[in-house]
Amino acid sequence: MSSIAPLAGLKVLELATVLAGPAVGMFLAELGAKVIKIENQTTAGDVTRSWKLTTEDPNWAYSAYYCSVNWGKEIVLMDLSLPENLTWLREEIKTSDIVLANFKPGSARRMGLDYASLSDLNPKLIYGDITGYGPGDERPAFDMVLQAEAGFLFMTGEKGGAPVKMPVALIDLLAAHQLKEGILLALLQREKTGQGSKVNVSLYATALASLANQATNWLIAGKIPQRMGTLHPNIAPYGELLEGSDGGQVVLAVGNDRQFQLLCKALDLEVLAQAPQYSDNKQRVLNREALFVHLQAKAGQFNREELLRQLHQMGVPAGAVRTMPEVFAESAAQELLLHWALPDGTEVRSVRSVVFELE
């Protein structure tokens, strides 16, 4: 990881809660900015403090969820309904570079914490605002609802099965990435003009923008995406899960004819590479079920690690389906861990959000 802190000297006030906004705050903190996180004292802080697993201490002031996006911040509990606290906050904003907010519609204006009010205090201020459905839409927004309304829920899950949500709040995280990009561009613009600006991101627009090829499969090809489990609608064998003799699983990501030939060679199935029904990707997509039967029969002769080694030696894109303990047993994963302490002194571990190299 780079030791360079390109945002050192910047001051950020985080008025956001839950995941998307705090993820942006942590990103800025990792890049060297001073981030002051203001939490609602009347509700015992960010709501995610109470989002605990049954295995967590119910008396602890934090949660594992909270720790995922709150590294490197100065935490301040404050009741913003008190005039003296709002006065203090406005004074802080005068010397801040960035404000992060995800207020309920109308709340920011009522407290005088909207961009129009704050830019009068500090014309150079960059205001990062996350909404559910865009300015003016009063509907509350949660990642689960956005997964449904943007089509992700309908097309996620096993064929013939019920809809399945993604195991992380991915719409929130993608919205955070959108806001990060917007803020960095706003900082560049401020360098040129000396003026701040507002960057607004909605979860809804983010979700739609993230549909990628599934959107164009409908918009161009007229294909309504269906639930396919791990399978890819355009490529085969891509997403097929091969089970080893020990019950361990390996997923394939074979994206072209050359890789398919290498797969056949790795499993001693060269005859399949010459078969007309598997000669190119189109044919493999049409005949993927029959192809899987052949692949699984051979894969079952190896345990997971043997199978993976065989595939990797031939250059076949494949990976083990790992549990969290297996994931973080890897040295590469260990290198991405942050070891830090919460305000109460509790030592915790979390994963970096900045994983690019800047040299």
Image: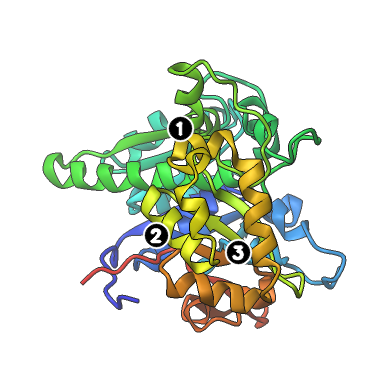
Q: Position of residue 344 (x, y in %)?
A: 67, 78
Hey, what amino acid is under mark 3?
A: Ser
Hey, what amino acid is under mark 1?
A: Asn
Work out how far the residue at label 2 is from the one at label 1, CA to CA, in angstroms.
Answer: 30 Å
Which of discs 3 and 2 lies nearer the camera? The answer is 3
The residue where tag 3 is placed is 68
Which comes sooner in the sequence, label 3 or label 2? 2
Viewed as shown, does residue 295 lie left or right of 179? right
**Tag of residue 50:** none
Assign the C terminus to one quadrant of the image.
bottom left
The residue where tag 1 is placed is 213
- Front residue of 79 and 57: 57
Looking at the image, which residue is at 46% across and 81% down?
A: 335
Looking at the image, which residue is at 20% across and 46% down?
A: 188
The residue where tag 2 is placed is 28
- Front residue of 105 and 80: 105
Q: State if disc 1 and disc 2 touch (CB < 8 Å).
A: no
Which of discs 2 and 1 lies nearer the camera? The answer is 1
